[in-house]
Amino acid sequence: MIDILDSVIGKFKMTNEGILFTQITVGDSLPKLEIDITTTLVILGALASRDWQPQHHDKVFAEERNGTRDIFLNTNHNAAMIERYITDWTGVMGRLGKIRFSMLTPVFPGDKLRFSGEVVRSHDTQMDFGWVDIAIVMSVDGKPCSKGVVRVAVPGSKEANPWRIDAEFWNPDFLALKEAS
Amino acid sequence: MITNTKEQQSSQSIVADMMGKKYYEFESDIVVDSTSIRSICAASYNVNPLFWDESVAEAIVGACIAPPSSVSAWLRPHFWSPTVNDNARALKLHFDLKERFGVPEGVMVDNELTMFTPVRTGERLRTYQTLRSVSEEKQVKLGLGRFWVIDVVIENLAGERCAIDRYTGLGYRKIQNDE
């Protein structure tokens, strides 16, 4: 398994080789990320998630019906962005258990979307993986546009693999998500 | 704000009538496929090789899978299809609630997705929706409306639970400038 990862890390331009639960401490910050939002990206995200609501691809509709200045990211696209941000940090062994977020203001083409995250809880399952809750903020021009918390399973050792945990032991609901401070 | 007792009773009866029931059970005809998975990843510049390299996915997960956060996408119908399945409309319960409460506008304000068995390529999914709660009428920035919480339960055809997608929606009426 490690051999396969070694062979693809360069190919896929991954930012790190993965993190272990033992390397994580509450209060750790995730590396920041910026994504330039374009019209194409907004429409691609909406259509890829089969969201045909016009406010995600029709500017006139968005202006006239939603009162917004342009089309904006849909819910699934926000979630996909968050997943990408988290697994950039965990590496491929990170397995998402839960995502909760609130969209405070729409994200439009032309916005530079900035991501930040902080570990707010860690829980060792004693099964060679741990649950980590991460408070995330997505912001544009310094103003938060989405806030949320993600729970991700992280391996406890290089041999561990959260993707192979039996369903009976996979319990992302073991505790309510930790709120950001 | 609601001040009329008759209206209050009406709202309460709508909620009582709708809570705890399974709505819009349906089996999607969308087959999870790698091309769509890669479009989803492209929209967030997601480099995770689980979704781009079959050998990595097989070695780590034992199958090619979709990004867990994308699970609800596999329940949504094509933009057009020669066959009709009205239950396939995304979050149809949200639109029903708008109609029942007589509010023309609606947005999703909060989403909590809990992920269980990964969704594999070649699979199809089935789902149903349930109403968990409805708030009292409230004045918010967008207008006058109510918040409601809807669970979308998602399973594969083997009956394994893949996810529960919990949405908080707001149904509202815009405030006119001359009001």
Image (spheres, rainbow, N blue to C red):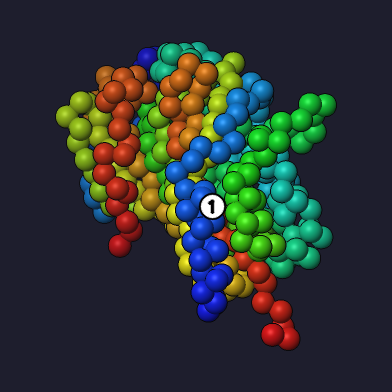
For this rendering, which residue is in front, A94 or A146? A146
For this rendering, which residue is in front, B48 or B106? B106
- Residue corresponding to mark 1: A34
| Identity, as a three-letter code, of the amino acid under mark 1 | Glu
Residue at the limit of the structure toward the front, as seen here: B6
Q: Quadrant of residue A140?
A: bottom right
Q: Residue at x 75, y 51 (%)?
A: A54
Q: Is residue B135 above or below residue A116?
A: below
Q: Is residue B119 left or right of residue B85?
A: left
Instruction: Pinpoint residue B110: horizontal percent, then vertical percent.
Output: 49, 54
Q: Residue at x 53, y 63 (%)?
A: B11
Q: Is residue B21 left or right of residue B88?
A: left
Instruction: Pinpoint residue B129: horizontal percent, then vertical percent.
Output: 53, 39
For this rendering, which residue is in front, B139 or A167? B139
Q: Residue at x 55, y 26 (%)?
A: B126
- Chain letter of disc 1 in the image: A
Q: Residue at x 78, y 65 (%)?
A: A64
For this rendering, which residue is in front, A78 or A11? A78
Instruction: Pinpoint residue A162: horizontal percent, then vertical percent.
Output: 33, 25
Question: In what quadrant of the picture does the C terminus of chain B appear?
Answer: bottom right
- Residue A7 shows in this picture: no
Instruction: Pinpoint residue A119: horizontal percent, then vertical percent.
Output: 30, 50
Structural crowding at the residue carrying mark 1, measured as other residues with C-alpha within 10 Å and reported as few (<14), some (14–19) or many (≥20) = some
- Residue A164 shows in this picture: yes
Q: Is residue A113 left or right of residue A133?
A: right
Question: In what quadrant of the picture does the N terminus of chain B appear?
Answer: bottom right
**Secondary element at image label 1:** strand
Q: Is residue B96 above or below residue B32?
A: below
Residue at the limit of the structure toward the left, as seen here: A126
